[in-house]
Image (cartoon, coloured by chain):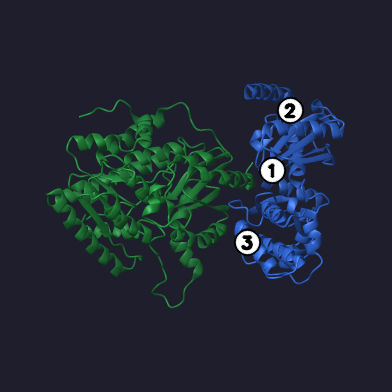
């Protein structure tokens, strides 16, 4: 057993900078590491079988070069980055990988991985329907069931009700701790920066769930007790969109006289807001992942059984969780960001901006190509946006 | 204005706009009246050039650095003006400068050397904006490359385009592909004025598409280096379907806005009682900064 020498925020920073740090140690000690892409593979099942779930991210500072051999260039650069890192051997510590049909490229990623990256002992693709309608939830439960059977075989053990219950409880505990961490940004100034927050979330996505929970408890204690606090700034912003797995975007925003106090992104609130509800079974998992995670990859059409569609009511049912976040975290501006070619998020933008307008929340939409360098032109736009927020 | 008495009437305020292609500076007095401006190519050495620009504007205005109460830098190279008291984005500065010249303005379109921006302005303040800064298509650079391809001067190109009312349709907006298209149109025997008018229409179409996303409201002001071109102004009006106002010197709205914002900032400091001695401190810091860079 290797004892970590750092604690709390510095431990989070250490793992953020070398995400494979802990899982490589665990692997040496005989643990099996199962990578997963996006939010839809149920991590509870991975943990319950004694495997270590490891969320796979890209790397915005690594130019995409190798992936060009196996993928076209006009698709999600985040997913291309993952394939690129895989081809370069950066994920060699993974014993298996689970993907999901979150979007078309999310699905082809798993196929490319199996064909080109590595003949991993375990590769699985979960099909995920694109609505939250009741028959879709039932279908998704079937998909989770076939994933369960496949990974049981790989782990060499059965998923008992008791194991699943314990895993759901410990993952729910993690979600509760993350929400506690977010509560620390409700004050003005917030007690931690969005950069620190992201480092913690990236770290716990690279650790066994119990170790992640320990880290979260340490971090929360440390932040509550520390003297140095982030400075008060002109704007309190919400950041929306797909994956933000690199602190450079948050740093850019926080250099523009703004604090990011809350997000609606898949490394942040989307990953940790919803609990699995008891009784803990596969149906509860299907419900949590397909219905309760609010990612635009699932179309939530509240009016699909009504004859006449009420536009305002539909917008409200789709986005009122954002309204709640805006109120609770006292947000006065929103940055909607997306990676290039993400049609899933792109289509959501006009509706969401309209909704934010009705709430009186100014917003800006920015697109980048998932590289640290591409952020430079965005800087001026973010700064100008903060300048237009007349709060002083 | 309360607090104004504390600022002696001989104090002045400067704005410096380091753009991708051209740099500009302006000085205003306490009443926001412009005393002088200078314009020159940016070049590779932003920091050295910012220094020279400041010397030039002071000489032209007949002032010394100690007469300047506050300096704001803006533009692409705004971080490279070490003696500036504050940096503000070119979007906010352009809006301020345009509104100073045209107080009723609601929409401003600015096409610079390598970007295009559309500003929505309400009561003289920037309220919304969109930019195209990912590629040179539809910017000044596009026109420069076209002029190079055809061996013409920029002004000449504008004048020639005014000779026709039947522009050729240029389909490609990519700077590189459009040059190929221009050449092939010439070889097909199309007339030069028609082709040039087509180029301007293509650029206008691209930026108007951006403007329509924010809804175009009159009056519309057209600024930036590209607005100096008569052919471009004609094309912009044709595509927008409304007349556009062009300042006498369309390059300087950014630095003028920065200078006026510098005046506003200085007044705010006076009101808060924080003005005393702030300039001297800033200048000392800037000198240290310069020293380190030149080593």
Q: Colour of chain B?
A: blue
Q: Residue under circle 3? A: B180
Q: Where does the image place residue A17, in percent across and percent down from the top left? A: 38, 35
Chain identifier, green in the render: A
SS label for mark 2: loop
Q: Is residue B219 visible?
A: no
Give the CA distance from mark 2 to mark 1. Answer: 29 Å
Quadrant housing the C terminus of chain A? top right
User: Which numbered disc covers residue A365?
Assistant: none
Mark 1 belongs to chain: B
SS label for mark 3: helix
Q: Residue under circle 1? A: B19
Q: Where does the image place residue B92, in percent across and percent down from the top left? A: 68, 46
Between marks 2 and 3 in the image, the one whose residue lies nearer the viewer: 3
10 Å crowding of disc 2: few (<14), some (14-19), many (20+):
some
Determine whether label 3 and label 1 are within 8 Å by CB: no
- Residue at x 33%, y 44% (from the top left corner): A176
Give the CA distance from mark 3 to mark 1. Answer: 28 Å
Residue A12 appears left or right of B19: left
Q: Is residue A155 visible?
A: yes
State the residue in front, A16 or A336: A16
Determine whether label 2 and label 3 are within 8 Å by CB: no
Q: Residue furthest bottom?
A: A307
Q: Residue under circle 2? A: B275
Q: Is B257 situated above or below A301?
A: above
Quadrant housing the N terminus of chain A? top left
């Amino acid at each position: 057993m290797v004892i970590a020498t750092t604690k709390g925020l510095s431990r989070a920073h250490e793992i953020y900078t070398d995400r494979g740090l802990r899982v490589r140690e665990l692997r040496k000690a005989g643990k099996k590491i199962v990578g997963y892409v996006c939010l839809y593979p149920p991590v509870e099942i991975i943990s319950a079988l004694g495997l270590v779930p490891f969320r796979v991210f890209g790397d915005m500072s690594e130019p995409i070069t190798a992936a060009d051999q196996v993928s076209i260039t006009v698709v999600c650069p985040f997913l291309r980055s993952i394939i690129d890192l895989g081809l370069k051997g950066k994920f060699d510590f993974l014993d298996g990988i689970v993907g999901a049909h979150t979007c078309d490229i999310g699905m082809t990623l798993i196929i490319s991985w199996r064909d080109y990256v590595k003949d991993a002992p375990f590769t699985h693709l979960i099909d995920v329907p694109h609505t939250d309608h009741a028959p879709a939830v039932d279908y998704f439960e079937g998909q989770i069931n076939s994933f369960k059977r496949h990974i049981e075989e790989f782990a060499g053990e059965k998923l008992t009700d008791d194991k699943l219950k314990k895993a759901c409880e410990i993952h729910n505990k993690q979600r509760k701790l993350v929400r506690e961490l977010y509560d620390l940004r409700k004050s003005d100034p917030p007690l931690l920066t969005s950069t620190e927050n992201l480092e913690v979330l990236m770290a716990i996505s690279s650790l066994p769930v119990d170790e992640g929970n320990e880290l979260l408890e340490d971090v929360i204690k440390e932040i509550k007790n520390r003297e140095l606090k982030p400075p008060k700034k002109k704007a309190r912003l919400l950041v929306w969109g797909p994956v933000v797995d690199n602190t450079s975007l948050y740093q850019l925003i926080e250099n523009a006289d703004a604090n990011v106090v809350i997000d609606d992104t898949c490394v942040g609130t989307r990953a940790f807001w919803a609990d699995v509800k008891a009784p803990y079974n596969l149906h509860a998992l299907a419900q949590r992942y397909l219905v309760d995670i609010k990612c635009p990859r699932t179309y939530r059409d509240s009016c699909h059984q009504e004859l006449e569609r009420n536009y305002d009511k539909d917008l409200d049912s789709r986005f009122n969780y954002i309204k709640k976040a805006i109120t609770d975290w006292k947000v006065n501006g929103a940055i909607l960001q997306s990676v290039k070619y993400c049609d899933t998020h792109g289509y959501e933008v006009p509706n969401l901006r309209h909704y934010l307008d009705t709430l009186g929340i100014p917003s800006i939409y920015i697109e980048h190509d998932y590289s640290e360098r591409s952020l430079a032109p965005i800087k001026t736009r973010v700064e100008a946006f903060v300048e237009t927020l007349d709060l002083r | 204005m309360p607090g104004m008495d504390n600022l002696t009437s001989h104090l002045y305020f400067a704005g410096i706009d380091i753009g991708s292609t051209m740099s500009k500076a302006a000085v205003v007095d306490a009443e926001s009246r412009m005393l002088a401006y200078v314009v020159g190519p940016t070049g590779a050495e932003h920091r050295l050039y910012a220094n020279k620009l400041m010397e030039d504007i002071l000489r032209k205005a007949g002032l010394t650095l100690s007469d300047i109460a506050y300096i704001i830098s803006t533009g692409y190279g705004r971080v490279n003006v070490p003696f500036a008291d504050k940096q503000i984005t070119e979007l906010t500065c352009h809006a301020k400068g345009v509104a100073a010249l045209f107080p009723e303005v609601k929409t401003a379109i600015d096409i610079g050397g390598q970007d295009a921006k559309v500003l929505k302005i309400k009561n003289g303040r920037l309220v919304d904006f969109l930019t195209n800064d990912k590629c040179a298509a539809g910017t000044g650079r596009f026109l420069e490359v076209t002029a190079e391809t055809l061996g013409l001067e920029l002004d000449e190109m504008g004048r020639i385009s005014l000779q026709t009312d039947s522009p050729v349709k240029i389909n490609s907006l990519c700077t590189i592909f459009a040059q190929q298209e221009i050449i092939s149109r010439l070889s097909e025997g199309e007339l030069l004025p028609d082709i040039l008018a087509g180029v301007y229409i293509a650029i206008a179409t691209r930026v108007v598409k951006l403007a329509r996303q924010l809804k175009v409201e009159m009056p519309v002001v057209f600024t930036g280096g590209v607005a100096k071109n008569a052919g471009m102004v004609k094309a912009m009006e044709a595509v927008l379907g409304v007349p556009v106002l062009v300042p006498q010197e369309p390059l300087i709205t950014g630095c003028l806005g920065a200078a006026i914002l510098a005046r506003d900032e200085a007044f705010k400091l006076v009101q808060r009682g924080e003005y005393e001695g702030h300039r001297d401190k800033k200048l000392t810091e800037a000198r240290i900064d310069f020293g380190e860079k030149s080593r």
